[in-house]
Image (tube, rainbow, N blue to C red):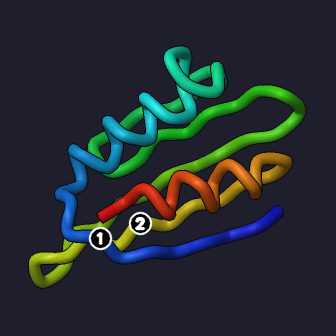
Amino acid sequence: MARYSVETRDNPDQILRKAEAFFGDAGLGLEVVERGSCCVSFEGGGGHVSVTVVEEDRKTLVDLETREWDYQVRGFMKGLS
């Protein structure tokens, strides 16, 4: 299991929408297994991805946890502004 963090200027809702588009049905095809106002979790392909967002001082901290999807999570992080 791996954990990553990144800061972005996008707001939490934007991050969660981007995560669903990237990892969900329209993207990698992972199944959404949990969704909340601050997080979304996906499962599939023998692994998982969890995305949690916290807004602080005009920035959003994005925490990602993954098993089996490290390469894709790093690609998602590069696409955040």
Q: Quadrant of the N terminus?
A: bottom right
Secondary element type, mark 2: strand
Which residue in the protein does label 2 denote? 62
Q: How many marks?
A: 2
Question: Who's the residue at 76% across and 67% down the image?
Answer: 2
In the rendered view, does 25 fall on the left or right side of 67? left
Q: Amino acid at mark 1?
A: Thr
x and y percent of residue 63 in the render? 50, 67
Please say if 76 is above or below 61.
above
Q: Name, please, the residue furthest toward the bottom.
A: 57
> Residue 62's x, y, as percent?
41, 66
Looking at the image, is mark 2 or mark 1 nearer the viewer?
Answer: 1
- Where's residue 20, x and y in %? 44, 31
For disc 1, the marked residue is: 8
Residue at 37% x, 60% y: name it.
80
Determine whether, in the image, residue 79 is placed left or right of residue 30: left
- At label 2, the amino acid type is Val
